[in-house]
Amino acid sequence: MAPLTMIDIMNDLNLQSQLVSMSACETGVAHISGGDEVVGLIRAVLYAGTPSVLASLWSVDDIATSVLMEQFYSNLRTGHDKSESLRQAQQFVREITAGEVARILESIQAQCANNLERALLQCDIERMRDINPDRKVYRHPYYWAAFMLVGDCSGLEHAISSPDVRDQTFHRPTSI
């Protein structure tokens, strides 16, 4: 299967969503193409019909991003608008401790059926347990500031139907 490209999105998709979140590395990076045209995934997704896009500007940490995305969607579910949901999620990541991260990872691991993912999570859990449990491990902006919201920053028109977005947001690489 070929990767989804900007051209595919612009030509073939009619997105009927209120928000597209692209939590992979550098999804918000664009480039200038011929003249002064700025092209990138954000522009393509907006062109395809989505009023709001959440994207990253640089390579992001898997665990910090998972925590941020889960908190972002939790904030949306409680009625905050998109920009406030992102701000609060970023603040949450800045303040989270190694002990809290370990507990979140254990919760995710308990729901994980894939043995490889469980093993990878166990490595991350042990790494967090080796750190002072009160240490705020993601204080540096590298961990939380990569994400930007483009487009409509208001609240969602319809409630999020999924009570738990964890399965949709936590993706670990399967190769090392």
Image (cartoon, grey):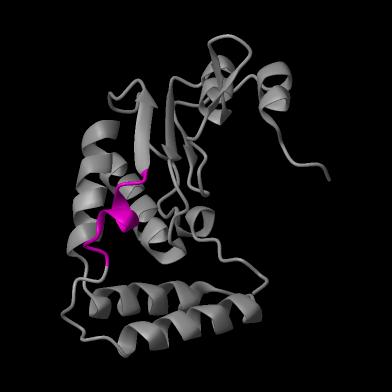
Tell me which corner region of the image, top left, top right, bottom left or bottom right, holds residue 76.
Answer: top left
Query: Quick check: 110 left or right of 118?
Result: left
Q: Which residue is painted at 72% across and 17% down in the image?
A: 11
Residue placed most toward the observer, 39 or 3: 39
The relative height of residue 163 versus residue 116 in the rendered view (above or below) is above
Magenta residue span: 138-146
Q: Which residue is painted at 32% across and 78% down in the image?
A: 103
Tell me which corner region of the image, top left, top right, bottom left or bottom right, holds residue 16.
Answer: top right
Query: Quick check: 37 left or right of 85?
Result: right
User: Where the N terminus falls, by quadrant?
Assistant: top right
The answer to whether any part of residue 150 appears in the image is yes
The relative height of residue 55 versus residue 154 in the rendered view (above or below) is below
Residue placed most toward the observer, 65 or 115: 65
Task: Name the spot of residue 80 as percent of width and height, x first.
Answer: 22, 36
Query: Quick check: 20 left or right of 7?
Result: left
The answer to whether any part of residue 81 appears in the image is no
Residue placed most toward the observer, 10 or 29: 29
Q: Is residue 64 magenta?
A: no
Q: Is residue 141 magenta?
A: yes
Extreme-top residue of the structure: 35
Task: Name the spot of residue 68 as percent of width and height, x first.
Answer: 34, 54
Tell me which corner region of the image, top left, top right, bottom left or bottom right, holds residue 130.
Answer: bottom left
Q: Which residue is painted at 43% across and 61% down in the image?
A: 61
Task: Name the spot of residue 53 as percent of width and height, x first.
Answer: 44, 30
